[in-house]
Amino acid sequence: MSVQLGMPQPREGSGAGVPPARPAGAAPGLLDRYGRRATDMRLSLTDKCNLRCTYCMPAEGLEWLAKQAVMSAEEIVRIVGIGVDSLGVRELRLTGGEPLVRADLVDIISALRSNHPDLPISMTTNGVGLDKKAAALKAAGLTRINVSLDSLHEETFTQLTRRPFLDRVLAGVDAAWAAGLGPVKLNAVLMRGINDAESPSLLAWALDRGYELRFIEQMPLDADHGWTRRNMITAAEIRELLSRDYVLSPDPRARDGAPAERFEVRRRVAGSVGPYEQVAAVGPTEQAAAGPVSEAEGPVLGTVGIIASVTEPFCADCRRTRITAEGKIMSCLFSREEFDLLGLLRDGASDEALAERWQDAMWVKPKAHGMDHTGLGAADFVQPDRSMSAIGG
Ligand code: SAM
Ligand code: SF4
């Protein structure tokens, strides 16, 4: 069988997309064998996208799913309803592909909001076209937005996304803020030799405007399968890059299952040494023995997040359940198995039967993704067939 990169392929062991039944008497909700409970739902609205980020999609050749294969607005609303009303989902993130390319996006959000008045509903977007839609999204009931922005330099942005749309994205970020979709969070993936050196200025730009920047470690979810552990920029390197201009200290607020580890950011005073530099220099044990470190002066300018999925994974505290655009349940971004929910729904299943399927699928959630087991090569880690755009990041 020829494999089309990035496209959904039959999964090993997934049979007809039916998970084994979880043990009788298992607690209700989206619980797994290791005691984790999923309350945070990521739902992909489409596999389509108008950018071609190098770490996500191929330059060309990725076929879209047929329209019929993708969940309709009504199907989305029903599935979210089951998650929220019966399975303990407390937070919803809409993603893709690019959610803004869906013509019925505002209608979907309105319907979700009218059914779930108190549900936090956020969306991750590349921001292209957001300037025109931000106000309508807010009015429809969207709570918050994350915009992906890897560079403020036109050339670098175009190199990374393979499209010359930086101005449109910046207009989208501003419009989101003006529409009240804050706090606006920005997602940046650093690529070695391309935009890594820009990280402090990207942070300065975000802090100036009151946006919360989060750096995401590049994960092996690119359709081109070009990721290498050796070449990715690690969280430790990100802290190091930022520490040239800033001092980072752990945000005292509880992380509470969030993928990003947050840091308070202060400007570095010339010659001062912060905790991360000391730990890097002498190791954590020695640093603890040495006692308090010198503090950089100056007020907290804001926060920065680092999502270290590869080198500092947070699998033990994962609270996510994912539904792909064609209605497959993925318990983990890196699952090799996915289970069909939409097919069952279209066969006329009851809400109870759909909830059962979802619970069974989550019960077999892997303990961890295994990406970093070997340090350099992660030899026992097998990259999923789907690219990030086809899963819903
Ligand atoms: N198209 C929207 C966007 O780019 O924001 C939403 C979907 S995108 C798949 C969601 C997030 O995944 C983006 O912030 C993107 O930067 C991130 N992402 C995509 N591929 C990634 C990879 N290989 N490693 C880490 N993050 C990735
Ligand atoms: Fe599209 Fe988002 Fe993937 Fe970039 S990261 S190609 S914007 S889906």
Image (spheres, rainbow, N blue to C red):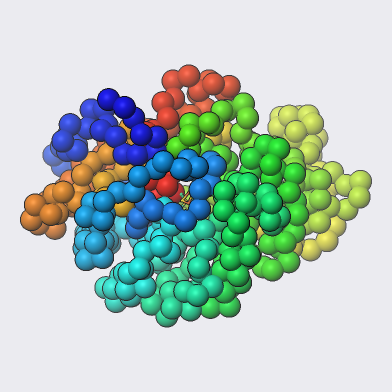
Horizontal side of residue 337 vs 143, given as left or right = left
Depicted 4 relative to depicted 378: above or below: below
The percent position of residue 14, horizontal first and vertical second, equals 22, 32
The percent position of residue 20, horizontal first and vertical second, equals 17, 34
Quarter of the rendering containing residue 307: top right
Q: Residue at x 39, y 53 (%)?
A: 48
Most extreme residue toward the front is 61
Q: Residue at x 27, y 42 (%)?
A: 362
Q: Is residue 333 visible?
A: no
Q: How many marks?
A: 0
Q: Residue at x 28, y 73 (%)?
A: 111
Of residues 122 and 327, the one nearer the viewer is 327
Quarter of the rendering containing residue 106: bottom left
Of residues 249 and 149, the one nearer the viewer is 149
Q: Is residue 197 visible?
A: yes
The percent position of residue 142, horizontal first and vertical second, equals 42, 71
Quarter of the N terminus within the rendering: top left
Quarter of the rendering containing residue 279: top right
Depicted 374 relative to depicted 44: above or below: above
Q: Residue at x 38, y 77 (%)?
A: 140
Of residues 389 and 79, the one nearer the viewer is 389
Most extreme residue toward the right is 271
